[in-house]
Image (cartoon, grey):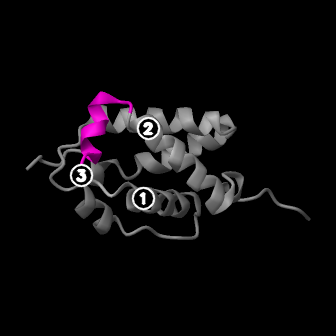
Amino acid sequence: MSSEPALYERLGGRSGIEAVVDTFYERIMRVDELRSYFANTDMPQQRYHMATFLGVVADDSTQFDTARLSTAHAGLGITDDHFALVLAALAAVLKEHGVNPMDRYAVASKLRAFRDVIVSQVKE
């Protein structure tokens, strides 16, 4: 009996997710409303963290530490509009990388679950 591969494998495992993340940040850096969030960011480290985060999100057997996510985004002033721009950019990149619509929806749904620890942070 053969079962369908998990979302993590359907995204191409770590290498597929890293490729998505590279394209994602190329796109994000072209969005005026988002680029400033990364002005003083170590982008190789950021890419590593994002690929790890997406990998954990795509692997239902792993729990993500939301406290770390909240701390990383605290004080940035991320709005619902910014969050929506990020999700839209990621959806476009996933489509560009050949991810099917159901898996794009699954990724977006999983990321929306983290909205409250990312959005509505007061900018310092």
Q: State which quadrant residue 43 falls in.
A: bottom left
Image side of residue 90 versus residue 113, left or right: right
The x and y percentages for residue 45 are 39, 62
Q: State which quadrant residue 32 falls in.
A: top left
Kind of residue at disc 2: Leu
Dominant secondary structure of the residues highlighted in magenta in the image: helix
Kind of residue at disc 3: Asn
Disc 2 marks which residue?
87
Q: Residue furthest left?
A: 124
Q: Can residue 8 be seen in the rendering of this structure?
A: no
Kind of residue at disc 1: Pro
The x and y percentages for residue 91 are 53, 36
Which segment is the magenta one?
30-39
Dot 2 or dot 1: first in sequence order is 1
Disc 3 marks which residue?
40
Q: Residue at x 41, y 51 (%)?
A: 113
Whether 89 is drawn above or below 50: the answer is above
Q: State which quadrant residue 68 falls in.
A: bottom left
Q: Residue at x 8, y 50 (%)?
A: 124
Disc 1 marks which residue?
44
